[in-house]
Image (cartoon, rainbow, N blue to C red):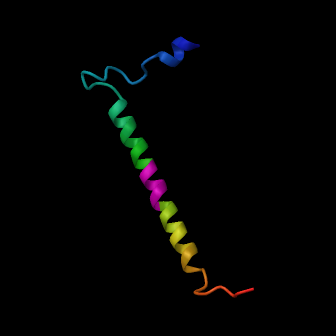
Amino acid sequence: MLEFLADNNFGDTRSGDGLAGPTALVLILLLAAGTVLLIRNMSARLKRLPDKFEEE
């Protein structure tokens, strides 16, 4: 089990033939897309809030 976890699945990263660069790029793009969607959702929710809340 430890050998499977320690195995290098990204290829030879020193020569530039590995998959570490493209995999990181995809991960960064997915995180950026998620952040943009979260910002849009929270902006829409904030616009729906009333200007003032009633005091109890």
- 38 with respect to 24 (left or right): right
User: In which quadrant will I find the C terminus?
Assistant: bottom right
Foreground of the two, 25 or 6: 6
Residue at the (40%, 48%) spot, across then down? 29
Q: Quadrant of residue 25?
A: top left
The quadrant of the rendering that contains the N terminus is top right
Picture mark count: 0
Q: Position of residue 49 (x, y in %)?
A: 60, 80
Residue drawn 42% across and 19% down?
8
Q: Is residue 19 left or right of residue 49?
A: left
Q: Position of residue 23 (x, y in %)?
A: 39, 35
Vertical relation: 55 (above or below) 23 = below
Identify the residue at horizontal 48%, vertical 16% (top origin): 6
Verify whether residue 35 appears in magenta.
yes
Answer with left or right where residue 56 lies relative to residue 32.
right
| Chief SS of the magenta region | helix
Asked if 8 appears above or below 19 in the picture, the reply is above
Instruction: Give the residues in magenta.
Output: 31-36
